[in-house]
Image: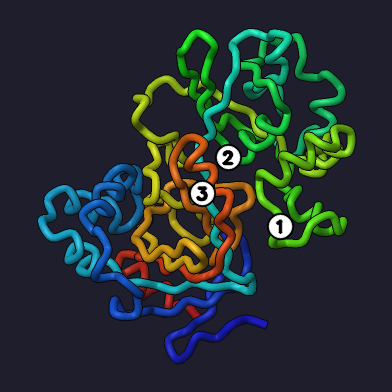
Amino acid sequence: MRRVLGALAVTFMTTGSAFSDAQLLDWSDLQGWARDDHDLAVQVFQNTCMDMKDGDWPAICEYAKTQTDARAFFETFFRPVMIVDDEPPLFTGYYEPELPGSRNRTSRFNVPLHQLPDDVPEGPWLTRAELEETGVLQDRGLEIAWLEDPVDKFFLQVQGSGRIALQDGDRLRVGYGGKNGHEYRSVGKELIRRGIFEPHQVSAAVIRNWVQENPEEGRKLLHHNPSYVFFREVTRLSPDEGPLGAMNRALTAGRSLAVDPDVVPLGAPVWLEKDGAEPIRRLMIAQDTGSAVKGAQRADVFYGSGDKAGDIAGRIRDNGRMVVLLPIADALALVDRG
């Protein structure tokens, strides 16, 4: 049954054909809005807003370059809109891993990262299990780098980008290069379904340990996720920049958000109120997507690069809410639709 949010709530159709409700909020409804660093938020907004070509977005982006009061900028040109669907809110974290590896296969580094073959058909192709078990990717010169642990590769594919620490001291950066057309399936949920762990016990570290302690069953567990991500080498980013997101721009730790683009326009500001042990009340920018990020109240917070960011991101699985900031005309049209 759809949620109804009051007199201003209306029903509209998202691109993904799922019915949702939208409600226009006041700025005073946003918890902690006045205390946020709006100057930093507008800087992150400018990183990608130049790529937004529809409606009032280009004009707003141009004005963002000259604003002197960031909070007033957002309050003048946007209206906060709460969008929900039948799925419960869920906010998780992700990061850019840094893993040891090699450009060439060695006895230690023998787990390949592949670039996208040029003959991949449209629609679903071979599954993860088929790609890894049949050798269809071998001897084609598709290897970008080699890792030492298949679990590292699996989680790198889930994250979609990362840095490889090469043995000569250099760093190789890889980004998302395509996929095999299959939907992501959570191996954590599968462990819960099998009764191996309770929901509160599952984390990336727990999954890693279980796979390493149960090599044969662990391999089959990873194959439960049929989605297989290919990579490309990224050379245009400086070492201090974040990885490239879905908008092909560098992400900003703590301010970039992965969303469902069928609901939230890429590049839009999003006010996040994430609960849990490490709550967030912050203006984020929707600059990325993720295969597991589907729904009106589903988002992934980018926490940065390296092990420390990974430790934090792996603990995040919280409820709360997010509110999309839309240009005034778009916001009013959305709540008037229906």
State the image coordinates of residue 15 (x, y, percent, origin top left).
Answer: 56, 60
Is there a contact, CB below 8 Å, between mark 2 and mark 1? no
Q: Residue at x 16, y 48 (%)?
A: 65
Assign the N terminus to one quadrant of the image.
bottom right
Tell which circle, 2 or 3, labels the residue nearer the N-terminal end: 2
- From the viewer's side, name the closer residue of 144 and 55: 144
Q: Residue at x 58, y 49 (%)?
A: 314
Q: Is residue 214 above or below residue 271?
A: above
Is there a contact, CB below 8 Å, between mark 1 and mark 3? no
Can residue 296 be seen here? no
10 Å neighbourhood of mark 3: few (<14), some, or many (≥20)? some
Q: Is residue 12 left or right of residue 124?
A: left
Pointer 3: what residue?
Answer: 312
Q: Quadrant of residue 294?
A: bottom right
Q: Quadrant of residue 195?
A: bottom right
10 Å neighbourhood of mark 1: few (<14), some, or many (≥20)? few
Q: Nearer the viewer, mark 2 or mark 1?
A: 1
Pointer 2: what residue?
Answer: 159
The amino acid pointed to by label 3 is Ile
Classify mark 3: helix, strand or loop.
helix
Q: Residue at x 30, y 42 (%)?
A: 47
Tell which circle, 2 or 1, labels the residue nearer the N-terminal end: 2
Q: CA distance from mark 2 to mark 3?
A: 14 Å
The disc placed on residue 27 is none
Pointer 1: what residue?
Answer: 201
State the image coordinates of residue 155 (x, y, percent, origin top left).
Answer: 65, 37
Q: Is residue 244 left or right of residue 3?
A: left
The amino acid pointed to by label 1 is Gln
Q: Is residue 86 above or below residue 178?
A: below
